[in-house]
Amino acid sequence: MRGSSLCAVAALAFAVPLAVAAPVSAEQGETDHREARPYDAQRAAFADVASALARAAISRKRVILVMGANWCHDSRGLAGWFATPRFADMLERRYEIVYVDVGHPQEGEGRNIDIAQRFGIEEISGTPTVLILSPEGTLLNAETAPTWRNAASRTGDEIFDYFASFE
């Protein structure tokens, strides 16, 4: 029975398409990367998160939940960095990445906030809010998760080093 349960989890993990690091569309930014627009309000965010966690449990990778929106310059900027070859190579080896559209939580029009709450982040006060989860789903960066609202003004090296530091 245990073997069939693991197979069922594995099948679910690969059956649900995931919002990936590649941009849906991009525009040239004022830095040395492009902005990306990977946030999709129509996606089944809970299913995307469950799928990423199931894959992480098998692959032993960590999970990055980027809770942002396409209207947000910093959300687009971070996604743009993630789509560069340097980042994509490192991130693909270490992480499952999920982009979760949160709407406009600062204006009381948020969505998917319950996903952040599931991992101990009670509110989204700025976008993006970036959660790093262990393969078991434990939040690893509670103190720094809400600090990414200035992502577009951070250097590529600073961002790269932050995500590379989670072994």
Image (cartoon, rainbow, N blue to C red):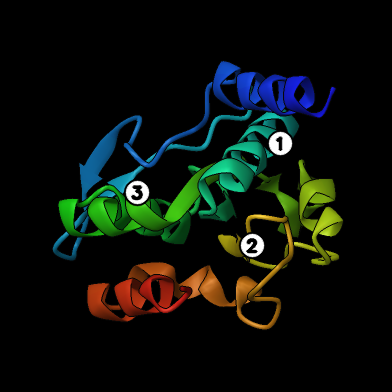
Dot 2: element? loop
Q: Nearer the viewer, residue 144 or 15?
A: 15
Q: Tell me where residue 86 sits by quadrant.
A: bottom left
Label 3: element kind: helix
Mark 2, Cα crowd under 10 Å, few <14 / some 14-19 / many 20+, is: many
Q: Earlier in the sequence, mark 3 or mark 2?
A: 3
Which three-letter amino acid code belongs to the residue tagged 2?
A: Ser
Q: Which residue is mark 2?
A: 134
The amino acid on which the numbered mark 3 sits, given as a three-letter code, is Glu
Q: Is residue 58 above or below residue 89?
A: above
Determine the residue positioned at 86% across, 65% down. Answer: 122
Q: Is residue 97 above or below residue 148?
A: above
Q: Is residue 43 visible?
A: no
Q: Position of residue 85 (x, y in %)?
A: 17, 51
Residue drawn at the location 35% of the way across and 30% of the way down: 24
Foreground pick, 87 / 128: 87
Label 3, on which residue?
92
Q: Position of residue 11 (x, y in %)?
A: 62, 18
The residue to which callout 1 is attached is 50
Q: Residues within 10 Å of mark 3 (few under 14, many from 20)?
A: few
